[in-house]
């Protein structure tokens, strides 16, 4: 993959000050119609159109956290047109990369106001196909000045909209057969910044 460790820092967990009730968004940041807003499934179904462009993507924000790895994904279930290369069907997830690193493509330089009504429509579509669910994270405790591993705990996933640059995985075009090339099996990296990462609260 392009990245070895992909994580949204806690400082990036900005919340759109909006309330979703019966599919209606009640707050109103200034709309920015020039910014394309898509679901994860829509992005994957039109990957060639969106590759190397900047879009806002709505999906389920989930993590995979262990003692040695820490990843954040934006995902959607039951996508009708997943990405297929060399007979391999990729997972319907994007890795979210929110760190600046030399050699990586740059995230969008702008921080646009997104249209809340459009986000509400896209979130409704995601929720029709996607189980909210939870993921496990590693827990630690401090005792006697020493931090020790305390097992795993389950935390709920989140809904999110993230504005970022769409970049294909480094092994996207590699022919590894129907089983794929291993690793995280994610076709896209969404390169973003803290200011463009928004958790959506119900």
Image (cartoon, helix red, strand yellow):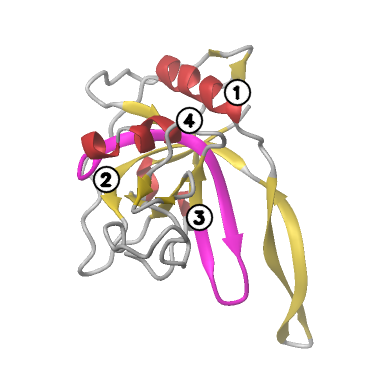
Picture disc at residue 101: none
Identify the residue at horizontal 27%, vertical 51% (top origin). 167
Q: Mark 1: few, some, or many residues within 10 Å (few <14, many ≥20)?
A: few
Question: At numbered mark 3, what does the secondary structure look like: helix, strand or loop?
Answer: strand
Mark 2 and mark 3: span between their CA atoms? 16 Å
Which of 116/17 is in front?
A: 116
Identify the residue at horizontal 43%, vertical 36% (top origin). 40
The answer to whether marks 1 and 2 mark residues whose Cβ atoms lie closer than 8 Å is: no
Answer above or below: position of 90 versus 119: below
Mark 1 and mark 2: span between their CA atoms? 26 Å
Mark 3 and mark 1: span between their CA atoms? 22 Å
Main SS of residues in magenta: strand
Question: At numbered mark 1, what does the secondary structure look like: helix, strand or loop?
Answer: helix
Picture disc at residue 128: 1
- The magenta span reads 51-72
Answer above or below: position of 14 versus 113: below
Mark 4 and mark 3: span between their CA atoms? 23 Å
Identify the residue at horizontal 34%, vertical 54% (top origin). 86
Mark 4 and mark 1: span between their CA atoms? 13 Å
Picture disc at residue 165: 2
Question: At numbered mark 4, what does the secondary structure look like: helix, strand or loop?
Answer: loop
Residue that carries the numbered disc 4 in the rendered image = 80
Residue 186, quarter of the rendered image:
bottom left
């Amino acid at each position: 993959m392009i990245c070895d460790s992909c994580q949204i820092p806690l400082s990036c967990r900005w919340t759109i000050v909006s309330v979703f009730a019966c599919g209606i968004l009640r707050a109103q940041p200034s709309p920015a119609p020039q910014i394309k807003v898509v679901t994860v499934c829509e992005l994957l179904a039109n990957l060639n159109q969106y590759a190397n462009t900047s879009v806002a993507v709505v999906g389920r924000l989930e993590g995979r956290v262990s003692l040695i790895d820490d990843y954040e994904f934006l995902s959607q279930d039951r996508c009708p047109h997943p990405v297929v290369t060399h007979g391999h069907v990729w997972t319907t997830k994007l890795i979210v990369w929110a760190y600046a690193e030399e050699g990586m493509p740059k995230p969008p330089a702008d921080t646009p106001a997104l249209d809340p009504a459009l986000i509400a429509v896209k979130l409704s579509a995601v929720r029709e196909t996607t189980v909210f669910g939870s993921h496990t994270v590693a827990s630690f405790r401090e005792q006697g000045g020493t931090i020790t591993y305390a097992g795993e705990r389950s935390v709920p996933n989140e809904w999110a909209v993230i504005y970022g640059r769409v970049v294909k995985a480094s092994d996207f075009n590699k022919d590894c057969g129907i089983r794929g090339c291993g690793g995280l099996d994610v076709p896209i990296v969404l390169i973003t910044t803290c200011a463009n990462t928004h958790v959506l609260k119900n």
